[in-house]
Image (spheres, rainbow, N blue to C red):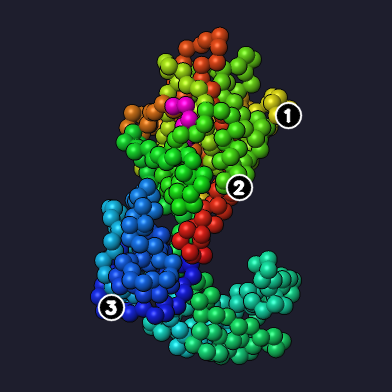
């Protein structure tokens, strides 16, 4: 949903709008736009301008911004798409001309994007009527476009925005939960003006709610789906051996906010991006960490050196083949993003392999639902004991395939090297578990699903450690170090925080 700003000084044309991409609509505040259209990938209005003093980017600049952001491929039900189309047609869209951005995008991505755009644009609507329902437990808001939104009174009281109940400087609630009456009913509700409602509570406390604030927090199924998409960017572009590995110059993402935003958007959607042209020395990952915020410290240090070592305390520190795995499932909260910087590369062997764990998990679910159920419900023991940054003895239980309450795959926790000899399940369930894991592992290693490439010195591969499993082909042993990668981790919380801040800065939106 995001925030909608009033479009002042614009001429609204009575035509349809053609849009491509995915995202949400945002007011650009162009002082004088001749051809204004709404890009639903990023949500920015843009167009050919005459004497514009606003901040709307030109179509050419917009095209450059979106060139490396991939399209999506997930389904939205036809019924929802029709409702989106009707809602969009009801909404006054500034400048109804075809979007000048190129690129091909699936209808699924477009439908969610238009739903997002519709919600944004509709935020400029005023309130026609407000009334109490359900014996004062519910407030119904009727909007100018004919739609309605219902808000439970307990939620409204809990989220009163007055200085007594809310601290604006911290963006945090001051109202103590023990002071909240969960059975509260309103005493009076009134329309203060077309863009604000006022509620008086039984204790005479008064709360006011802006129309834009309410519309953004609508409890409808579509509105909540859009909010999830806006906050967490859950779209995934699945891939197999046909992966077109996204590439971007390292120095460009370090100093250009638009490029950094494209990098993080692509990383979230595709799961992997190759950064090129970094210096072939240690320390570049520290710079990358500062770019997003900070790196994740683990028992192997803030960064770690992947090279052949005597008495290796990790199988990665050998020349042998590494099977597909995610890093650190032995931690309760495994690192979300991994960076591997190639400083030196062997001439023979050492190729990297990656596979889309979410894509393969979905394949397994269709192919063998029972195997999927076993791997998504069985707690597997992991162990890591040794000395590196400090001494450590770590134990954890994880499901190989983590799913959310809706059954969607949200994380893969699979590392055969650190899977413990302890297996805390009944003996009669062991064979079926191994059979399920074998089928999953075979799918991971099928030629159809895995992608092989070789890092060059100066390359930094950045990938989603919760989704993308990685491996390495063996390479010849040598008395000298012939292959050297520096590795580091970051948490998704840090990465997504930077993505949202860059989006606000680059696209002028919240």
Q: Which residue is mark 2?
A: 293
Q: CA distance from mark 2 to mark 1?
A: 24 Å
Tag of residue 467: none
Residue 390 disc label: 1
Instruction: Please give the range of residues in magenta.
Output: 456-461
The one of 38 and 119 positioned closer to us in this rendering: 38
Q: Is residue 23 above or below residue 466?
A: below
457 in the magenta segment: yes
Q: Residue at x 48, y 64 (%)?
A: 508
Q: Is residue 439 above or below residue 254?
A: above
Q: Position of residue 377 (x, y in %)?
A: 53, 42
Is 395 drawn above or below residue 149 in the view shown?
above
For marks 2 and 3, give the CA distance. Answer: 44 Å
Q: Residue at 56% of width from left, 41% of height from top? A: 288
Residue 381 showing in the rendered view: no
**What is the C-alpha distance between the residues marked 3 and 1?**
66 Å
Q: Nearer the viewer, residue 333 or 269?
A: 269
Q: Looking at the picture, tell me which residue is in the foreground, 93 or 318.
A: 93
Residue 251 percent location from the top left of the image = 49, 41
Query: Alpha-carbon neighbours of circle 3 within 10 Å: few (<14), some, or many (≥20)?
Result: some
Q: Position of residue 5 (x, y in %)?
A: 47, 74
Which is nearer the N-term, disc 2 or disc 3? 3
Q: Main secondary structure of the magenta part?
A: loop
Disc with the residue nearer the chain's start (3 vs 1): 3
Q: Which residue is mark 3?
A: 13
What residue lies at 73% left-to-right and 29% top-to-bottom? 390
- On screen, residue 204 versus residue 491, left or right, reads right
């Amino acid at each position: 949903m995001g925030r909608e700003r009033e479009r002042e000084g614009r001429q609204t044309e009575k035509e349809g709008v053609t849009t491509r991409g995915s995202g949400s609509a945002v007011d650009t505040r162009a002082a004088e736009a001749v051809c204004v259209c709404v890009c639903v990938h990023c949500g920015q209005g843009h167009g050919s301008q005459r004497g514009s003093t606003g901040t709307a980017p030109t179509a050419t600049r917009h095209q450059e911004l979106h060139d490396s952001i991939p399209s999506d491929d997930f389904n939205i039900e036809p019924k929802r798409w029709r409702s989106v189309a009707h809602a969009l047609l009801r909404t006054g869209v500034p400048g109804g001309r075809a979007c000048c951005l190129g690129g091909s995008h699936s209808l699924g991505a477009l439908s969610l994007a238009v739903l997002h755009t519709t919600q944004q644009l509709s935020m400029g609507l005023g309130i026609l009527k407000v009334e109490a329902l359900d014996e004062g437990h519910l407030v119904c808001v009727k909007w100018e476009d004919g739609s309605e939104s219902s808000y439970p009174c307990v939620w409204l009281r809990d989220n009163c925005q007055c200085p007594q109940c809310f601290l604006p400087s911290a963006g945090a609630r001051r109202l103590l939960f023990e002071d909240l009456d969960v059975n509260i009913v309103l005493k009076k509700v009134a329309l203060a003006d077309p863009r604000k409602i006022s509620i008086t509570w039984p204790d005479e406390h008064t709360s006011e709610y802006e129309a834009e604030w309410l519309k953004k927090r609508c409890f409808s199924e579509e509105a909540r789906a859009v909010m999830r998409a806006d906050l967490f960017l859950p779209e995934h572009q699945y891939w197999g051996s046909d992966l077109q590995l996204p590439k971007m110059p390292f120095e460009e993402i370090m100093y250009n906010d638009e490029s950094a935003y494209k990098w993080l958007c692509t990383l979230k959607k595709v799961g992997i991006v190759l950064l090129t042209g970094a210096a072939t020395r240690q320390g570049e990952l520290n710079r990358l960490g500062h770019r997003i915020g900070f790196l994740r410290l683990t028992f192997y240090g803030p960064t770690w050196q992947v090279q052949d070592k005597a008495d290796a305390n990790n199988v990665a520190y050998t020349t042998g083949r590494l099977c597909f795995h995610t890093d650190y499932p032995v931690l309760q909260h495994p690192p979300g993003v991994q960076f591997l910087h190639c400083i030196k590369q062997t001439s023979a062997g050492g190729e990297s392999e990656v596979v889309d764990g979410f894509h393969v998990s979905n394949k397994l679910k269709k192919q063998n639902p029972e195997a999927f159920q076993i791997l998504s419900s069985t707690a597997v023991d992991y162990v890591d004991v040794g000395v590196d940054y400090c001494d450590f003895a770590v134990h954890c239980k994880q499901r190989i395939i983590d799913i959310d309450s809706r059954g969607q795959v949200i994380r893969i926790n699979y590392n055969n090297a650190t899977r413990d000899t302890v297996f805390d399940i009944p003996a009669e369930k062991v064979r079926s578990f191994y059979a399920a894991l074998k089928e999953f592992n075979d799918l991971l290693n099928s030629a159809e699903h895995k992608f092989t490439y070789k890092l060059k010195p100066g390359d930094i591969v950045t990938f989603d450690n919760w989704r993308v499993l990685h491996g390495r082909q063996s390479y010849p042993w040598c008395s000298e170090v012939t292959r050297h990668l520096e590795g580091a981790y970051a948490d998704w919380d840090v990465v997504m925080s930077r993505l949202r801040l860059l989006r606000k800065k680059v696209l002028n939106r919240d």
